[in-house]
Image: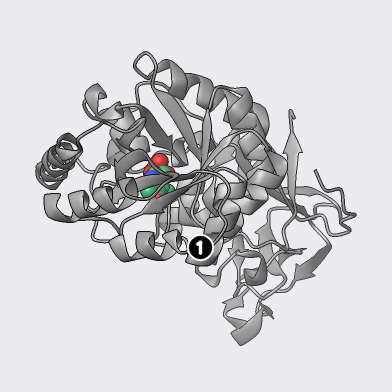
Amino acid sequence: MEHTQQYRPTKAIIDLQTIRDNVHNLRSYLQEGVQIIAVVKANAYGHGDVAVASAALQAGAGILAVATPDEAVRMRQHFPDVGILVLGAAPISFVRYATDHKIMLTVFSTEWVKQARSVQGLSKPLLLHIKVDSGMGRIGVTSNEQLLELYEEIQATEDFIVDGIFTHFATADEEDTTYFDKQVVLFKELVNALPIKPRLVHAANTATALVKDAALQFDAVRYGISLYGLAPSGYVADLLPFPIRQAFSLQTEIVHVKKLKAGQSVGYGATYTATADCYIGTLPIGYADGMIRKLGGQTVLVGGERCPIVGRICMDQCMILMPRAYNIGELVTLLGAQGNDFISIDEWATKCDTINYEVPCIITSRVPRTYINE
Ligand SMILES: *Cc1c(COP(=O)(O)O)cnc(C)c1O
């Protein structure tokens, strides 16, 4: 792990024991022999890819999945022997690295296979996972004909191996299963059309693995959001077969305290004006840290009590209304537990009209990720 000095007190704290506990629970829920593919794309949903991947592997994950070739390179540098799957499209220029470093690539185009075949002097096998677009409308083959054409093209190439076949569901986190069921039917039809079953058939994201038919776990499940202790939707949250816990906390410290007189204002646009004398604390975190302006009015925890953000959030700082004059250096919890209270990522997501997935992803790299319980 990198240890670079950070002078600002603003930091994300990721509890790796919580990640391991989540993985243990998730693993115990799987059918015999089903592997866990830990989805650590986008810097492990903003949690820190290397630390999260280590914790997930320790707790029983067998394969890592990322979205991009560059993320795969980073994982390979830290984990020389683990299976790594790139879920998104990979350019032909990445094929050599993939063969040299045993990275599994997602494939969905016959043309791509032809081009990959023309890469000279590949010394080792290329492991390919065929993506089926059963209704997500993103990438993948959509029919038996496309699938078999692609399959034949791969089989016709020495050292190209159909290692897996997979799909992704668009509505697994919703109660209505009409669309989901159609995707299942199409995926099964295409898998069955293959002359030989590949090593890994996989379809389940968190929502599918936890609340749908266990048969859809196939050979492996791709657990993402649940590793981090978050539910894919309110519907899934209510049905969770075991508790999962949020691993991500966000903290800072008060850097300035002042008394505001009735009639005085704070922040750009002077949008907040004190109606009575009050105490204002300044926090060294702002929208350039991912604390977007939509979080104005959100409460933070100081001394175990909720204090609202007042005025507009600035690029690097924001102000809170406090019940008393706290000291400089007083701990402020923006996400996570303090005292008997807890601010969830879901609470921020609701405040921002978005989903919990987006919240830790948009906490920018200026906020150092620190780890407890390594
Ligand atoms: C991100 C992603 C996942 C993980 O989904 P969660 O809902 O976070 O569990 C699984 N599969 C694919 C293809 C993905 O892109």
Q: Residue furthest bottom?
A: 269
Residue 80: where, in percent of width, then height? 68, 37
Amino acid at the residue labelled 1:
Val
Q: Is residue 119 left or right of residue 182?
A: right
Which of 367/23 is in front? 23
Q: Residue furthest top?
A: 32
Residue 82: where, in percent of width, then height? 60, 34
Residue 95: where, in percent of width, then height? 52, 57
* Helix, strand or loop under label 1: loop
Residue 323: where, in percent of width, then height? 69, 53
Q: Residue at x 57, y 80 (%)?
A: 271
Which of 91/85 is in front? 91
Q: Is residue 364 left or right of residue 223?
A: right
Q: Residue at x 45, y 41 (%)?
A: 225
Q: Residue at x 73, y 74 (%)?
A: 261
| Depicted 264 relative to depicted 70: above or below | below
Which of 190/342 is in front? 190
Instruction: Work out whether residue 324 can be spotted.
Output: yes
Instruction: Work out whether residue 170 can be spotted.
Output: no
* Residue 313 figure quarter: bottom right
| Depicted 262 relative to depicted 112: above or below | below
* Residue 338 figure quarter: top right
Which of 290/200 is in front? 200
| Depicted 340 relative to depicted 313: above or below | above
Q: Which residue is mark 1?
A: 119
